[in-house]
Image (spheres, rainbow, N blue to C red):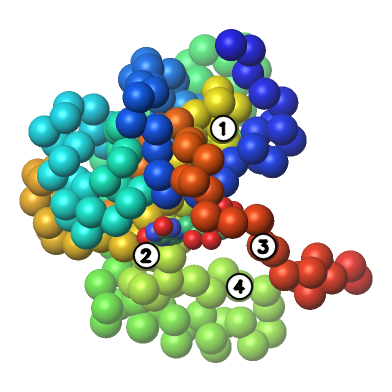
Amino acid sequence: MSEKKVSEAIEFRRSVRIFDDKKEIDHKVVKKCVEQAILAPNSSNLQLWEFYHITSNEEVKKIAKACFNQPAAKTAKQFVIPIVRKDLWKRRIASNVAFIQSEFEKSKNKDEKKKKGAISYYQKILPKIYGAGNLRGWANHIATFFKGLNKVVYRQVKKSDMRVVVHKSTALAAQNFLVSMAGNGYDTCTMEGFDSLRIKKILDLPAAAEISMVIGCGIRTKKGIYGARFRVPFDEVYFEK
Ligand SMILES: Cc1cc2nc3c(=O)[nH]c(=O)nc-3n(C[C@H](O)[C@H](O)[C@H](O)COP(=O)(O)O)c2cc1C
């Protein structure tokens, strides 16, 4: 089956609450959609995410139960669970630095200053914000306030701000996944109705990992779409200045 255009995929995507029991989905296609997910833009390219693809019947049942067996979970054929891994920041900084260095080695016109600037961003600036605990985060926040009285400054420096930053990036990747699935004629339902602790236990995740959402996957039934698509009027949310 040929893939839909992006605009068609966006139109096609609905939250499907009842998937067709008789229609299987190919786990290779779902995996390919996860490969598309990780091409999403993300803060400082740290890629502080992981994706768990649940395919075995036994695990699918466990995840459904941890999602209260809500219809979209109970009827799902597979799940994809985007995980937020802020705790991996040191490892991801090292990967970015290694990449910058290897690109520099390959380049013909070596720009030492540009390389140093990029590496310093990863090794000096990012650890200050990703490594900050509650106290240091608040200290950064107050310092930023005073610095920002006369100039433009980056203000999202509290520990809680950084949580938002990594969740944002993971959610963008999740949206890539949803659109990619729709492009392949597959359906999804994004869920936040789940017991996060139980899901973490099932997936054997460390305490610092956070579940972004659980995505049920399958093929829609007619009854699986609960109603017409509702959006508030466009002029309530769109402002041109
Ligand atoms: C973060 C998030 C959490 C959601 N949680 C649930 C959920 O637990 N159960 C559910 O049936 N739908 C859930 N939804 C689906 C929304 O209700 C749905 O996207 C919204 O009503 C718009 O409908 P549409 O997706 O068909 O356009 C969730 C959606 C998002 C983005």
The answer, for residue 106, to whether it is visible in the render is: yes
Q: CA distance from mark 3 to mark 1?
A: 19 Å
Callout 4, which amino acid? Answer: Val
Q: Which residue is mark 3?
A: 230
Residue 125 at x, y percent in the picture: 43, 57
Element type at mark 1:
helix
In screen coordinates, is 65 left or right of 40?
Answer: left
Q: Crowding near pointer 4: few (<14 within 10 Å), some, many (20+)?
A: few
Image point 58% across, 15% down: which residue? 107
Q: Crowding near pointer 1: few (<14 within 10 Å), some, many (20+)?
A: many
Q: Earlier in the sequence, mark 3 or mark 4?
A: 4
Q: Which residue is mark 2?
A: 163
Tag nearer the camera, 2 or 3: 3
| Residue 182's disc number | 1
Tag nearer the camera, 3 or 1: 3
The answer, for residue 45, to whether it is visible in the render is: no
Q: For ligand 1, tell me if the residue under mark 3 lies within 8 Å.
A: yes
Q: Earlier in the sequence, mark 2 or mark 3?
A: 2
Callout 2, which amino acid? Answer: Arg
Residue 166's place in the image compared with 172, above or below, is below
Q: Which residue is mark 4?
A: 153
Q: CA distance from mark 3 to mark 4?
A: 38 Å
Image point 23% across, 54% down: which residue? 69
Tag nearer the camera, 4 or 2: 2
